[in-house]
Image (spheres, rainbow, N blue to C red):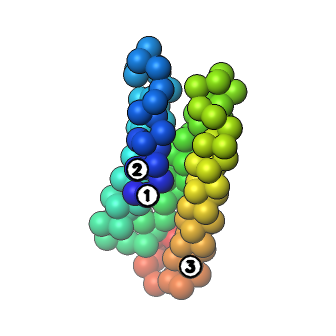
Amino acid sequence: MVLAEACYEQTRTFPREEMFGLTSQIRRAAASVAANIAEGHGRETSGSFVQFLRMSQGSLKELETHVILSGRVGILAWDKVDRLLERSDELGKMLRALIRSLQTIRPGREGSDQ
């Protein structure tokens, strides 16, 4: 949620003509990261949770791509790009660690759920 809030904050300064372009794409991807984590947490099995965490990782990579593009086309200052990418990298590490822990803590306990 903190990363999504930061993305919303940074895109407030984007040009109006980007409202349906990079602004929308960054906000959607950032919100999707948090939403997939929440949806996966509400699932019945750890395997389903892991599947949603992986979707969250994909949204995170999509977000990173849009943020980098924003810097490359001059819409977002590189210091702000770097800050968002640092937060994204931290979140990516947490997601990987959580996936690993879910896969190793419960091997075989839920049948084909792995």
Quadrant where the image shows the N terminus: bottom left
Which label's residue is closer to the chain start, 3 or 2? 2
Q: Residues within 10 Å of mark 3 (few under 14, many from 20)?
A: few
**Distance Cα–Cα, label 3 vs label 2:** 27 Å
Report the residue marked by disc 2: 5
Horizontal relation, residue 46 to residue 78: left or right = left
Report the residue marked by disc 3: 101
Identify the residue at horizontal 47%, vertical 20% (top origin).
15
Disc 2 residue type (three-letter): Glu
Asked whether the residues under the numbered discs 2 and 1 touch, taking CB atoms below 8 Å apart as contact, a structural biologist would say: yes
Q: Could you tell me residue 47's position as x and y percent? A: 46, 68
**Distance Cα–Cα, label 2 vs label 1:** 5 Å
Report the residue marked by disc 1: 2
Q: Could you tell me residue 64's position as x and y percent? A: 61, 42
Camera sees residue 44: yes
Identify the residue at horizontal 54%, vertical 72% (top origin).
98
Q: Nearer the viewer, residue 60 or 40?
A: 60
Label 3 or label 2, whichever lies nearer to me, is 2
Classify mark 1: helix, strand or loop.
Answer: helix
